[in-house]
Amino acid sequence: MNACVRVRKLLSRYIDKEARDTDTAFIEAHVAGCPSCKKELRELSCVRELLLRKERRALPEGELARRMLRQISYEKSGREDFSMVGMGYLARRLIFLPAIAIALSAAFLILVPQQTNRYSWEEHVLSGDPTTTAMALGLILGTRV
């Protein structure tokens, strides 16, 4: 294994002072002669220092337990579908509209009687007539407008 790869795998443990003595000696010897690993060590040390200085906020007493119990009760009651937990109320109510629209469109296409005097795209092109919005709608519906 390449020494740089091995050092980079061990750097987090080294920074947290959790590396074994043999690994610590190996890292220190390697970093002394390798500028890229030295830079990586410096950057990780800076990140660690920033994280240690960051103010930690604690949840109010019992808040985590309250949140967990509320979520469990929602899931047990069946009021909340797990796949829609992050969605808002309106989004959960409107999610089925596209499916209904597709079903109604399919029913319309099946149930509406087909026109007997169909006007095809080929006939339109051969006629030389200009294509207008009304003409395009007629071509879609299969009737001459």
Image (tube, rainbow, N blue to C red):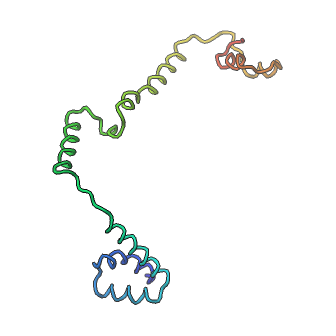
- Residue 21's place in the image compared with 144, above or below, is below
Residue 14: quarter of image: bottom left
Residue at 68%, 16% in the rendered image? 138
Residue at 20%, 41% in the rendered image? 72
Would residue 21 appear left or right of 118 to someone viewing this image? left
The percent coordinates of residue 120 (x first, y second) are: 72, 19
Would residue 16 appear left or right of 3 to someone viewing this image? left
User: Which image quarter holds the C terminus?
Assistant: top right
Which of 128 and 48 lies nearest the eye of the viewer?
Answer: 48
Which residue is at the far right? 128
Which of 98 and 46 lies nearest the eye of the viewer?
Answer: 46
Q: How many marks?
A: 0
The percent coordinates of residue 81 (x first, y second) are: 30, 35
- Residue 66's place in the image compared with 50, above or below, is above
User: Which image quarter holds the N terminus?
Assistant: bottom left
Would residue 87 appear left or right of 67 to someone viewing this image? right
The percent coordinates of residue 143 (x first, y second) are: 68, 13
Residue at 36%, 78% in the rendered image? 10
Residue 79: quarter of image: top left
Which of 42 and 91 lies nearest the eye of the viewer?
Answer: 42
